[in-house]
Image: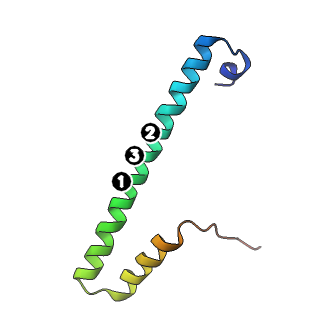
Amino acid sequence: MQWLQQDPNQNNVYHLSNVRREASGYVRKKKREYLKFKINEIETDRKTKNTRDLYRGFNDCKRGYQPRNNIV
């Protein structure tokens, strides 16, 4: 992959843009699948009256990703 960046001829630039487009499409698809799964999980918690997991799911969606610090 690094050779694509080192030799900037038109063919390599075109190939690299295609690879990036495919990768971003894959990531978008996976994100959509994950969000659908989380929504279904929250709906299931609501139907089964599992309040703790319901609100935990709400808060996870609202806050988004938060990296955790591991202090040694």
In this view of the protein, which residue sits in the foreground, 50 or 25?
25
Q: Quadrant of residue 70?
A: bottom right
Residue 49 x %, y %: 26, 87
Picture residue at 73% right of the left edge, 19% below the top? 6
Q: Nearer the viewer, mark 2 or mark 1?
A: 2
Judged left or right of residue 29, residue 45 is left
Amino acid type at circle 1 is Glu
Residue marked by disc 1: 33
How many marks do you count on the picture? 3
Residue 66 percent coordinates (x, y): 60, 68
Name the residue beneath numbered marker 3: 29
Which residue is found at the position 44% from the left and 46% from the top?
A: 28
Tell me whether circle 3 and circle 2 mark residues in contact (CB < 8 Å).
yes
Type of the residue with mark 3: Lys
**Residue located beneath label 2 in the image:** 25
> Which quarter of the rendered picture does the N terminus lie within?
top right
The three-letter code of the residue at mark 2 reads Gly
| Residue at (41, 49) in percent of width and height | 30
Q: Is residue 51 above or below residue 4?
A: below
Tell me the CA gap for discs 3 and 2. 6 Å
